[in-house]
Image: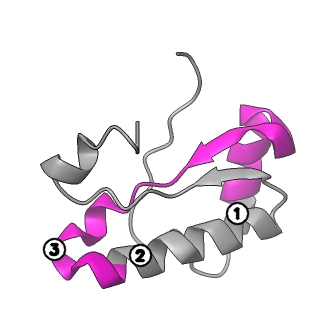
Amino acid sequence: MSGRIALIGGEEFAPGFEDVHAGLLADAGGAQARVVFLPTAAAEDGVEVAEGWCRTAIDHLSRLGAHKVDAPVVIDRRTAQDTAVA
């Protein structure tokens, strides 16, 4: 597998960050690029909070034009090793 990885944490969906996301999306291939959001920083906050961040990521990135956004709730070793997520 090849592609780009962007590690972004903290305020990633705050106002003013749209240009960063749009640039990353364009660099990755535009609207048809596969985008995966992993809410690992929210792990300590619980599943509900992580799920909320996943919904936010899907909504935000879709508004920027991404058609293939995945946001699995990966918050610990068990969820990271889930074959349904891989």
Labels 1 and 3 touching (C-beta < 8 A): no
Q: Residue under label 2, please give it.
A: 51
Labels 3 and 2 touching (C-beta < 8 A): no
Front residue of this view, candidates 53 and 14: 53
Sequence-earlier tag: 3 or 2: 3
* Above or below: residue 83 compared with residue 25: above
- Per the rendered image, the range of residues in magenta is 20-49
* Above or below: residue 63 compared with residue 5: below
* Above or below: residue 8 compared with residue 62: above
Quadrant of the image occupied by residue 16: bottom right
Q: CA distance from mark 2 to mark 1?
A: 15 Å
Residue 13 can be seen, yes or no:
no
Q: Which mark is residue 44?
A: 3
Which percent across, then down, holds residue 3?
Answer: 59, 23
Residue 20 can be seen, yes or no:
yes
Residue at disc 2, secondary structure: helix
Q: Measuring 80% from the left and 52% from the top, which residue is drawn there?
A: 67
- In-image side of 83 versus 56 (left or right): left
Sequence-earlier tag: 1 or 3: 3
Amino acid type of the residue tagged 1 in the rendering: Leu
Q: Measuring 74% from the left and 61% from the top, which residue is drawn there?
A: 19
Front residue of this view, candidates 25 and 17: 25
Residue at disc 1, secondary structure: helix
Amino acid type of the residue tagged 3 in the rendering: Glu
Q: Residue under label 1, please give it.
A: 61
- In-image side of 23 versus 17 (left or right): right
Q: Measuring 44% from the left and 56% from the top, which residue is drawn there?
A: 72
